[in-house]
Amino acid sequence: MNTPILSVRDLTVKAHLDGETRVLLDHVSLDLAKGEILGLVGESGSGKSLFCRSLVRLLPSSRLKIEDGAVLLEGRDLTEVSDAEMLKVRGAEIGMIFQNPTSHLDPVMRIGDQISEGIRYHQGLDACAARAAATEILSQVGFPDPLCQYDNYPHEFSGGMRQRAMIAVALSCNPKILIADEPTTALDVTIQAQILTLLMELRETRGLSIILITHDLGIVAQTCDRIAVMRGGKLLEQGPKRQILSQPKDPYTTRLIHSHPSMPGVEPVTEAAASTVAAPVKPILEIDDLHVRFPIGGSFFRGSAAKTISAVSGISLQIMPGETVGIVGESGSGKSTLARAVLGLTPISSGHISFEGVDLAQQKTAGLAKLRREAAMVFQDPFNALNPRMTIGQTIGEVLAVQGKVARVDIPDRIGELLDLVGLERDFADRKPRSMSGGQCQRAGIARALAVDPKLIIADECVAALDVTIQAQIIDLFRELAASMNLTLLFIAHDLAIVRNLCARTIVMYRGEVVEDGPSAQVFSQPKHAYTAALVAAIPDIDPDKPLLGNAEEASGSIRSIKRMP
Amino acid sequence: MHRYRFVLLRPLQFLPVIFGISIITFILVRLIPGDPARVLLGTRATPTAIANIRAQFGLDEPIWLQYFYFLRNLGNGEMGKSILYKIDVLNLIATRIEPTLALVICSVLLSIAIAVPMASIAARNAGRAPDHAVRIISTFGIGFPPFWLGLMLIILFSVKLDLLPVSGYGSTLGDKLAHLILPSLTIALSLSTVLTRSLRAAMIEGLKSDVATAARARGMPERIVFWRHVLPNSLVPTINLLAVNTGWLIGGTVVIESVFALPGMGQLLVRAIFSRDYMVVQGVAMVFACATVLVNFLADIATVAADPRVKL
């Protein structure tokens, strides 16, 4: 290995909170070689983002201080240089991209101007030259029409293009090092593959060194040269990726590797599905030629029906009692709309939904009343789906009181039982979402859904916002609940690996239509539709020898992603 | 420029709004107790004289017929005759609109000129001495009623320091502006506090936002981060607040014009109410209401200009 471009020695960051001092980064030492991609892995709170911010001295709060250690960028200690010098390092020598391009791009500034801003400041070019340079970078990161797209605003692009724009901003001043903080977590799996490929290409063409922060070991296995594992502010281990993945030294790393959903996990719950095939049971949920359309661009004068966009177009499905069904597809494929329509949260345009034989369109009041007593939803964002002013006990108690299935005096006991079911301590009943972690909040959300004593649970991307280890726990919880309570589970996710592990049956949605429906094993091993094949191929596998994308390149040629390019 | 198409279409929506406003002002004015004919002729007027005046101004007709005449006149560009001034209300308003309009515009501009720097200082030093200073000044601005603040400003700048005119309105442009400084400042001192607080909150949010972090991460100095990224983003929510407050301000000119003896519409309105000059009251009320609608329209245009995501 040649001399490292960046060498971090004993970096220690402490937080000073009214008299109390907490160590957030504990003597972290790392080397980054030129042209290397280093994967920094760990769950949220492990300090991996803080570590990268400390490198460029962008600490999130003035209460945090770099107490000890050195950050040597080509021999220069960045913890010592002046603030003015640091401005030249940021952007010009170390570029950063972030998890959420939507919130990190300035919404009221043209994309191109955000790129040329850095060029003008760091390289002192005039407006014209900077514009030319920015246009060039836009085309390098894959904008098809950079001359025109220079003048577009961030909201006019899809998530993937926004992330490309973020990369363009970070690359504008030719940095030597790129820090990518969870760059693909917010993206669909096919887009994720494209962004990762782009990063690897840029490494080749520009000789860039990249620090890739992620919680997904699959991404690391596919893209990185070396892996560093962090937990609780400490660096647990680091080394070449094959060595770490095959012979992890630290037990935590072993656990991380095993919780990765692409590992052949527990067999999906098949017994329930098998029994339904045998006996002629009526479907619990029957969807017949469902259409959901949203008006767009309607105005006061032209009426509301001027134009519509079809979110769900002509879906027919039968869900049997006790089935675990996974619905996958990219964002925008209509899977959430389908779930909301089933629960009567979004008005349907045409077609029928029957829940246990009651048609929701024809007997609206009766149907909805029945549905709301026997079906429940678990939402994507566990924090925002819980009322911040209510304790968990109050939240669950509210449902119990409204349902009236449990006598008022028994409600506290029932709350306790529900918390037991989802694996939360009973004293969580007195806590508010604010003082709980994401995983705990999601458990509370599930407890609230179970409070209805439902036959059907619809979970909409309910693990997308959680760390891998927590994800695995929640998935296990769903698996147990589905088996023990004979629940019918409609599990919506963009993460195919999770669906493959949890669900017996998988439905693939593409542009508002069902393109594939069948037993999970079959859908994933022998996808019939080209879109399914592309989706499956784009999952980053934890085995570094299975190349990323596989045949996704050719598949994506025939099937365009839903994401429009303006 | 299809985002701005609403500029052409929106005024059509104003027609029903203005129609509604006309009905409401028409009815409200007639709910004021008292008889204009009696006010005009004094307490010793004979019943016949009063009846004559009532017939002359159409006050003896049923109310719906009066409203019909009012609409018909409005179609002809007339708002009826002032009972007190004996000229058409629209002409009367035209002679009084300039000081009020100038006062509102000066006040709004002045309060923006006060609020933006104050909020910037407060937000960039959040939790430190300058922030507290701005908060104390703001509390004073809200705490004192405008009429009292106006009188104090007159005592300080006009009486003690003799820098500015006490009251009234000038004839040349410079003279007029000199007369407008104190009344505008009075309004701006209280209006700017509301804006400052909204802007400060948005700016503090903005300084902590991902947009600011991303700008810092590409090496932008704090100065550029603030003025180029934080400020434009925090203006958007403040525009609507300003619009709502300007609507309120248009009505509020009544007080300030009285304190500073500005010959504007506020003064006209007060006098018209005292003399039960129905036509003038409803004319001025309609102009005020339409102005408020117009201000909100302008705010919509400003919002669309400031935030490319907004579609109307």
Image (cartoon, rainbow, N blue to C red):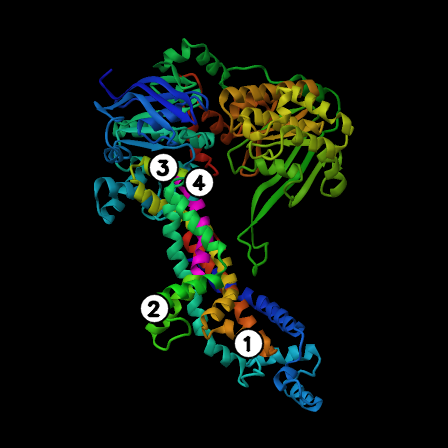
Q: Chain of mark 3?
A: B
Task: Name which of mark 3 and mark 1 comes first in the sequence.
Answer: 3
Mark-to-mark CA distance, 3 and 1: 58 Å
Pointer 1 residue = B271
Q: Quadrant of residue A107?
A: top left
Magenta stretch: includes residue A524: no
Question: Mark 3 or 1, which is nearer the eye?
Answer: 1
Q: Residues within 10 Å of mark 3 (few under 14, many from 20)?
A: many
Magenta stretch bounds: B187-207
Q: Secondary structure at mark 2?
A: loop
Residue A180 appears left or right of A314: left
- Judging depth in this view, the residue of A566 and A560 nearest the camera is A566
> Circle 3 sits on which residue?
B214
Q: Amino acid at mark 4?
A: Ser
Disc 1 with disc 2 on a shared chain: yes
Asked if both marks, 4 and 1, belong to the same chain, the answer given is: no
The residue at 59%/76% (across/down) is B274
Q: Residues within 10 Å of mark 4 (few under 14, many from 20)?
A: some
The answer for which chain carries disc 4 is A
